Amino acid sequence: MTNKGALAGLTVLDLSRLLPGPFCSMILSDHGARVIAIEDKRFASEAGANAGVYRNKKHMTLNLKKETGRKIFLEMARQADIILEGFRPGVTRRLGVDYDTVSQINPKIIYCSITGYGQTGPYRDTVGHDVNYLSIAGVLDLIGVKDGPPCIPGIQIADMAGGALYAVVGILMALHARQTTGRGQYIDISMTDGSMSLLTLVLSLTNLTGRPARRSDSFLSHRYACYHVYETADHRYLSIGAVENRFWKTICDYFNVPEYIPLQYDEARRQEIFDFMENQFRQKTLSEWELELADLEICWAPVRTVDEAMASELFKAREMVVEIRDDKGHDSKGIGTPVKLSDTPGSVRTPPPGFGENTKEILRSFGYSNDSIKEWEASGVI
């Protein structure tokens, strides 16, 4: 029998757009959930930039501002397990598709809202994007060069780690609780809350050392030579993460400076050690260092580009790089599923659908007739 995934049998209605919600529902769909992405056809021109997160899903159009559209959604919600949305607080209530309304017709529904600042608090109605959530949570201040400005990271940390991943966790928790209580529940995910939670170790180290975290100047961010990024002769970079003294000792022995072994975290000679290590690593190219350091246990890695990472044997072996073929026979590379389950593994089964591609198919699966579908198409409901 072909494995269908750990979440097979669950139906997810996803009203969200852009990245946080769709990335969350992509994870659910990778592991077998039936995910139906629902968008107003007004947004068709904005689709495509982030098509990859729609793999394994079905996509339909539906105008929730029309009463018929709202009734269709509620009928679908009656048969669903999970609803995901990313509107500003209060929008779903105005549309008449909020948790209170849906839970009256389907008490088992798990309803997850992902917003920038959450459903409560003084910022609930404030607009924002990833960079803003990282800023206000104190995360962005820690990213960048010492004595330089904060640097916007090249990935969406708040959207994905602070929002989408916590939404998945919350949904799975609610599913587990439903097995005991028989009822669903509401999940309030704030991307800013999630971003702040990433400061857990930072706060612990501050409490331990009494030294506030500073940009590129803290225990695990460039303050010491044992945890740093070094430039090579060909202007590439490698990272050293030799936190434990046994790893640091190996580096010092390799460079024949045993006197630095006990000075790993010495403040007085910190710059001296930095200068020495930076000079040493500039003596060889990155490829030469890969050969030199290959058999040394020092916690190091080459700083790869995205293209290099995608071509790496590591990620091919881990099935983290997959080929996705669209309905025209064109192949493209995608990211695989990072959660490896032995009995019910996730998988990439279908390419992203076109905008609204599955509307009629989905409505038929919920029992609607072709005549009704034609009428709704003519009236702008779908």
Image (cartoon, rainbow, N blue to C red):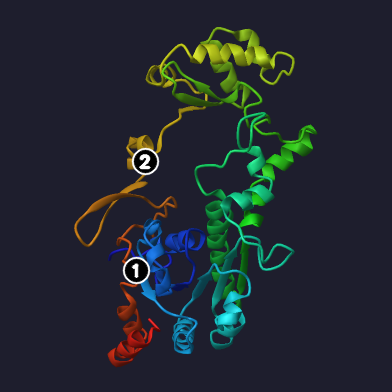
Give the vertical position of 17 relative to 358 (above or below): above
Residue visible at 37% across and 51% down?
Answer: 336
Quarter of the image for residue 277 reads top right
Say which of 194 and 64 sits in front: 64
Tell me the element at label 2: helix
| Quadrant (top left, top right, bottom left, bottom right) of the C terminus | bottom left
Front-most of 133 and 193? 133
Q: Can you tell which mark lies on residue 88?
A: none
**Residue at the far left in the pictured view:** 329
Residue 291 % position (x, y): 38, 18
Relative to 5, does residue 210 appear above or below in the rendering? Answer: above
Mark 2 crowdedness (10 Å alpha carbons): few <14, some 14-19, many ≥20 = some
Please indicate whether residue 295 sits to the left or right of residue 3 in the image: right
Disc 1 is placed on an element classified as loop
| Residue that numbered label 1 is attached to | 355
Q: Amino acid at mark 2?
A: Phe
Nearest to N terminus: mark 2 or mark 1: 2
The vertical placement of 253 against 236, above or below, is above
